[in-house]
Amino acid sequence: MKKTTRFLSILLAVALLVSTFAACSKKGGQSDNLVDELQTKDYEEQSSTLYQDELGAFFEIYQDASKEKIDINLRYAKEAIAEAKLMEAAVMFPIYSRGGTYAVSHAAPYSVTPCLWGNDEDRFHQAIVCTEFITTDDRNALRKLYAEKVGTGTYEQAAKDYLTEKGYTLTDVYGYAYTSDPKTWDPLATSRQEDTRAIVNTYDGLYEYDGENIQQPALAESYEVSEDGLTYTFKIKSGLVWTESQGRKVADVKADDFVAGMQHLMDAKGGLESLIQPVIVGADDYITGKTTDFTKVGVKAEDDTTLVYTLVEPCPYFMTMLGYSIFAPMSRDYYTSQGGKFGEEFDNSAADYKYGTDADHIAYCGPYLVTGATAENSITFKANPKYWNADKINIKTINWLYNDLSDATKAYKDAVAGTTVSATLNASALELAKQDGNFEKYGFTSMTDATAFMGFLNMNRAAYADVADENAAVSEFSDQDKVRTNIAMRNVHFRRAICFGLDRGAYNAQEAGEDLKFSSLINSYTPGTFVKLSEDTTVSINGTDKTFPAGTFYGEIMQAQIDADGVNMKVWDPNGDGGIGASSGFDGWYNPSEAVKELDKAIEELDKEGVVIDAENPIKLDLPYLASNEVYTNKANSLKQSIEASLGGKVVVTLVGCDDQDSWLNAGYYTDSGKEANYTIYDLSGWGPDYGDPSTYLDTFLPDYAGYMIKCIGIY
C-alpha cells in the first residue's frame, strides 16, 4: 500500500440487529425464511455466505490465476478476468488516484523513479532540481526526451544537459513539504507511508528502481535464480558500512543484516509481514507462532557477502518486492546495542529498547543521515559521506518542511520561494498562480500514480455509531431502515444502480476543479496499464478461447470479460493517453439510464424477498463525511444529489456529518473488521501497490480475514 498507503465493540451486535428483522412487516421488510436464516447465522457465517454469493466468481478465477507460477502472461490474463468479476460485483466503485492536478515544480520529470509500487518513488538522491521553476514547454520537451531515452540509461544526463543549455541552474538541495511526522524510524516495524517515506532515504535495499524504471543493483552487486525458481542468491557488495546519525561507523554491512531485518520484521509485526508470509519458506509458521526457530525460515547468510532466500513456490514477482521496506537490511550489531532482541525475547516496550525511537537510534547505510528533526517543524537529511555511491548522487541535502494545511496557499508560496520543490495547485493557490503569471508559464498537470481510492458499499452493516465513540457519526436509521438497506445492499443490481448513478466527475470536481475533474478519475482497482503481455496469450472467456497479442495491457483483457458478460461498464479506453490506452482520465461508470435499468432489476428481485422499493418507500444509504471541511462537504452533497437524481428518489442518501477528523476516520478508515464499519457508503479508503503484480491489489479481497480491504464492504 502503498503503501501505505495502509487501513486499520460493536454498538449493535448482530444478534440485536437480526432480532428486529421479524418485527418488520413484509412491505419494506423481508421474507420470513430469510429472517430465520439470518437469525441462525453468526457474523462470520454471514460473511462467508455473502462472500460466496457476491464474490464467488471473482475468487474462483483468481485462485486459478494464482496457480500460474511460471507462465506470467497467462497469470496476468487470468488476473484481469478475475478483476473484471470483482468490478462487476459492484461492492466498490473507483474514484481517483493521486496526481492529475495542476502543479508547478523545480524538478525535472522522471528524475525520480516512476515505479508504481514499493518505496523507491520516495528516494530523492537522483532527483534533478533547478533553482527556477521549469517552464511548461521545457517540461513537455523533457517528457518527449524521456520517451526517446527510456531504457537506455542515458536520460538523467540528457535531462541535465538540456536544462543547462536552456539556462537553468541545477541545485543539490531538495525541499519537501510534509504533513505528518514519522511515528517510528524503524522501517521494518510499520505499515505507515508517513514513516517509510522518510526512512527510505536512510538505507539502501538489494536492488532499486531508477528513473527509467529499471531495477539496478544497490547493496547487492548481482543475483542468481535456481532452475526451479525457488532459490534466489544475492552477492552483497564488499566495503559497505553502517554509520550512526553523526556519520561514525558502527558496523560493516553483511548478508546477515538482511537475515536480521527479516526476523525483526516478523517479530515486530508492523503490518507488512503478511506480504512475505506465503512467499518465503517457514515465514508463515514463524509469524503465526507455530515455530520459534528462525533457522527454519528461508533466509540465510552463507557468508558475509552471500545471501540466500528460499521460496515456498516460484514467485514471478519476487524481484519486484525488493523495492519495498519489507526487505530492508538492519544492522544486527547496532540493533542489539539499542536493546533490541529477537524471537520470544522481542519486546519493544522494554525500558532499554531504543531502536527506531528517533533518528538518532538507527543505523544508516543509505545516501542520507538525519542531522535534525523537530516535531511538526522540519527534518533535515544530509549526504552520508560513507555511502557507497556518494559521488554519484545529485541531491546533497533534503529539507522536509512541515505544513499543517491551515493555509491553503502555503505550499505554493513555499515553492515560489524555492524552499520546497513542488506544489499542487488547489483552488486558492491556482488563483494566486494565475494572478502572478506563474500558472501560464510553469503550470502542468501532474502524473497520476497507482493508488486506487475507492468508494465502498457495506453489504452487512452492523454498526450505526462509531465504535471508538458511541456519540460520534450516529445514524438516524430506524430498525426498519437497517433491515431494508442491508437486504438491498446484498443485491448486485441494486449496488450497480448506485455505482452507475454516481456522477464521479462532478464529485471529483469539488476538489480538483471542473477543468481537471477527469484527470485523476480511475475506472478499475488495478490500473489498466499496470502490466502487459510480453507474448501472445490465449485464455478462456466464458468458455471461448481468445488470443491477446503481445503488448496487450491488463485493462484491455479486463474489458473483454466485462463486455462478454454484458455489463455496461467501461474500464478501458483503447484511445486513451494518446493512443496507448488507459483505464483513467474518463468516467466509464456514470450512466443514469443504465442505473435505472439495474434498479428496476433489483426492485423486481427484492420484491420477491418482501422488500418494496418506490418513491414512498426508498432505500436509505448513510454516508459519513467531514462536516468541518468545505471540500468534503461539497463532495458528500454532490454524491447525494447525483445518486438521488439518477435513481428517481427511490434511493435516498443521508449525510452523517462528522464534526472532527477522528470521528470521520473511526467510521471506516480505522476499523479493524467489517463489523465495525459504520456506514452504507464510505469514500475515504484506498490501496496502493506493494509489488509489480496485480495480486498486490486482488489479494486485498480474499476471504476469511486474509484480504486487508475486505472489511470495507462489511464482511470479515
Image (cartoon, helix red, strand yellow):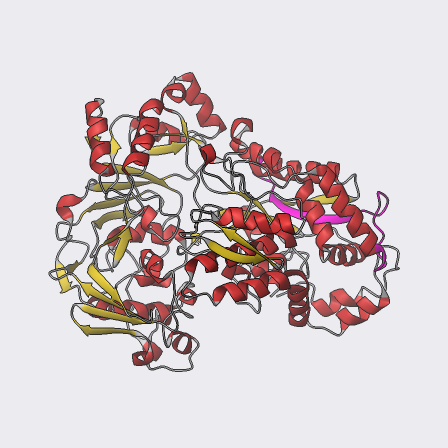
Q: Which residues are magenta?
A: 607-630
Give me the residue at 21% from left, 41% from top: 397
Q: Nearer the viewer, residue 356 or 273?
A: 273
Residue 568, horizontal then vertical, whole percent: 67, 44
Task: Choose top left, top right, bottom left or bottom right for residue 291.
Answer: bottom left
Residue 521, horizontal then vertical, whole percent: 53, 39
| Any part of residue 552 in sight | yes
- The answer to whether residue 407 is above or below residue 541 is above
In the image, is residue 629 part of the stretch drawn in magenta? yes
- The answer to whether residue 348 is above or below residue 210 is below
Q: Is residue 396 left or right of residue 309?
A: left
Q: Nearer the viewer, residue 531 or 21?
A: 531
Residue 576, horizontal then vertical, whole percent: 50, 35
Residue 297, horizontal then vertical, whole percent: 33, 76
Task: Choose top left, top right, bottom left or bottom right for residue 382.
Answer: top left
Give me the residue at 50% from left, 56% from top: 538
